[in-house]
Each structure stands twice: as structure tokens, then as C-alpha cells.
Image: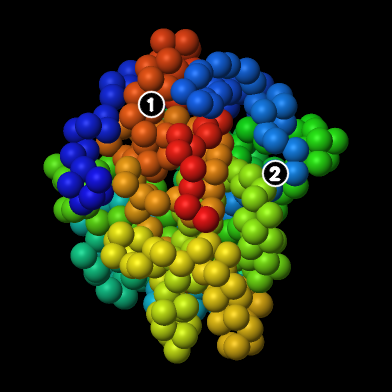
Amino acid sequence: MNPRDIRIADYTYVLPDDRIAKYPLPDRDLSKLLLYKDGSISEDIYRNIAEYIPADSLVIFNDTKVVHARLLFPKDTGSVIEVFCLEPDERYADITTGMMQTHEVYWKCLVGKADKWKEKELYLRYPEHGITITASIVEKLSDCYVIQLRWGTEATFAEILYLAGAVPLPPYIKRKADKADSDTYQTIYSKVEGSVAAPTAGLHFTERIFDDFRAKSIHWDFVTLHVGAGTFKPVKADVIADHQMHAEWLDVPVALIKKLRDAIATGRNIVAVGTTATRTLESLYWIGAKVHTKPDTATSQLAIQQWDAYETDGSLATTAALDALLSYLHRHGLDRVITRTQLLIAPGYQWRVVRELATNFHQPDSTLLLLVAGLIGDDWKRIYDHALAHDFRFLSYGDGCYLRASSPQKR
């Protein structure tokens, strides 16, 4: 199957609003867990997930941290202009660099009620901290604005967002964020600030589960992929060829690439927690394939484009691709790979790293649903029908599933 020819109408379903979880459960790991293996479906809860993961597996989580990306600037008229901080302007090398800026920063933002922004500058004042945040429009792009934000102190932009911003709940959770969301809409292992949406598959994991992992000799580690607002973007084109996939920043250290390479070489099971961890792990193969073919590729050109996986020679073994990436990073004196990925995973994709996936239930007409279908084929329909018929809660604060690939990966 050529993914370009996929009709999004074949990857939709009816999701009643009352099946969308508006709040999380009080205990994260009591969320329901649908289990899919060899075509069979069963149920349990996340607290018992270690029972279903083979010993000596390597489980990969996304340790990105959700920032308080919504800044609400009051106007003298009483109205409010919302500045939703998406990602750093191109003048910064990556999200972490942007987050560490002091005094001022340039950020790509969505602007609510932009037509009412008539002033040259807007202000948010925090006299108790000696801080005034000033916002001004630098440039209007096709889908967002470049906003200059100034605060004139040594505080980092990450600290400014924590002080002044609000939690960016997904648009389908139709309520205002409350104080509790600062904790519940964050994984317990979140670390690297930069996301405007949580890697929600990880919200179910608790220290109790990690204790079970230890007892069963299940290993785990972390990649970073900063989740952008594009993750909520529905596919509005009739066919996927006409859809523009969102790009997101990934950050993976050399030590983990070596660990993945060794796990694959010895045939160990690799489990991805969430679609963001999945796209990161699979992108590593294609980055390695790129630098294997073109060893002189500039570090600024490592990004993976939407169709690279379908246009690049994929005959290279996964271990060889990761070896090529490790060699490239060593030659350039780098201890990690930091770049963007726009990788689209859909039916027809040849899997390279991930064998099993723990993930939430996703929106209809979404690239996240296409990724699930790419792993397990048309059985995604049976799984979602079962979940709808058995009172599973959907989307970010909802329940989830643990899926094993329907066919062997090419390694």
C-alpha cells in the first residue's frame, strides 16, 4: 500500500462527546487497559501492565515536559488576547535553547482575537516578582505569528511560562484548566521542558508500575520529542498525499542509541509508550540511513521529512543504520542527535525498531490513528469498536491499549 493513496474516510469512527474523558482518574494506573495480541482482545488495568511485557524488554518513554504555553494578556477594554506559544523562532537551534533565553525571546505563537490586537505592545504585570512581560508582533506567518516577548530579568523563558502561563489542555477537553491539571496533565517522569501537549500514553504510569518493571527485569529509558499543537490537527484532505504532517523536535542521546542498537542486535523486544516515542525511535533508523548514504550530510540537514520512509532505500539493516548514526555523531563530536521529524507512519510503513505500543485511544481522522493502523492493520476497527462497546474512556485523560505488531518488523 502506498500511504499517499490512503483515504482518511477509511480511518474514522463515531466518537460521542460523552466518551471523551474530561478529567483523569484519581489513580493514574487504574485506567482500563485493552490488550491486543495475535488478533485476540482482552482487558485489564494499567497497574498490571508489567504482566504482559516480556522480561528483558526495553520500554521507551518520552520525557518531554508540558510548558504553561497559554499567556493571557488583558486589554484596557476588559477583553483578553491569548498568546499560545508553539515553538521557538528559527533564530534558536532547538527548543531547549529557546527555553533557556533570558530577558527576551522570539516565539512562534497562535494569537486568539488577533484582530483586536491594535496596540503596539501588550503587558502582563507581576509586581510581586518585579516582572512585566511585554508582547509585540514581529511578523505574521501563514499559520501563526512571530511574537517578541520581553521581561528584562535573568529568569529563563521556561521560568516565565511557569509563572505567567496556563496549562494548554487539548481543544477537545471543553473546560478551563484548573490547578490540578498542572500535575495530572504531566507524566511523573517529565523532565525536558518544551511540549504544548502531553505525551498522554505515559500519564498512566506510576512508581508502582516501575517497581513491577524492576522485579520482572523489564528495562526502560527515555527519548525526548517535544509535542506540538499539530498533534491535534485532523486530516482534512481526502487522501493523505494532500495532508501536511506536523514536524516536531526530537532529542536522543548517544547512550540510548547504543542501547537500542544492542537490543535489536540481540533480538530483544522494544516497547514504545505513545506515538511520540514511536515516531522518535523509527526516525532514528531513517536518520541513520540518510547519513549512511550521504556521510557528509550537514548536521542542519538531518531532519526527517514526511515521505522519507517511503522514498529512501530501506534495505539497510536497523543495526547498520544505528551504527551509521553513531559513527556520524562521533565524527561531529556530538553526544546526542537533535533535529526535527515529520515522519508519517501509516499502513504500508515498514517498521524498524518498535515491536509493541502502549497508547491511548485517538481521535478519528488523525495521523495518530493511522500510526496505530500501520502497526496492527485493519484490526484497529475491532479494537475501537470493543473499546466503545465496553465503556473505555477516550483521548488524553482516557484509558489506553497495549498492542503487539501484527507482522514481524524488518530488522
Name the side, left or right, on which 183 lies relative to 382.
Answer: right
Image position, residue 248 (x, y; %):
43, 61
Q: Earlier in the sequence, mark 1 or mark 2?
A: 2
Considering the numbered disc 1 on the image, is that residue within a helix, a strand or a loop?
Answer: helix
Residue that carries the numbered disc 1 in the rendered image: 379
Placement of 13 over or under 94, stated as above or below:
above
Residue type (three-letter) at the residue carrying disc 2 = Ser
Look at 24% across and 69% down and name the residue there: 140
Image position, residue 111 (x, y; %):
32, 56
Look at 54% across and 39% down and name the residue there: 357
Pointer 2 local density, CA inside 10 Å: few below 14, some 14–19, many at least 20 = some
Mark 1 vs mark 2, CA separation in Å = 24 Å
- Which residue is more in the foreground, 74 or 82? 82
- Outermost residue toward the right in this view: 215
Look at 45% across and 18% down and name the residue there: 387
Placement of 83 over or under 24, stated as above or below:
below
Number of callouts in the render? 2
Quadrant of the image for the N terminus? top left
Placement of 123 over or under 91, stated as above or below:
above
Name the side, left or right, on which 142 lies relative to 57.
Answer: left
Give the label on residue 13, or none: none
- Which residue is more in the foreground, 84 or 50? 50
Residue 129: tell me if it is visible.
no
Residue type (three-letter) at the residue carrying disc 1 = Asp
Pointer 1 local density, CA inside 10 Å: few below 14, some 14–19, many at least 20 = some
The part of the image, by quadrant, that contains residue 330 is bottom right
Considering the numbered disc 2 on the image, is that residue within a helix, a strand or a loop?
Answer: loop
- Which residue is more in the foreground, 40 or 380? 40
Residue that carries the numbered disc 2 in the rendered image: 57
Image position, residue 215 (x, y; %):
85, 36
Image position, residue 24 (x, y; %):
57, 27
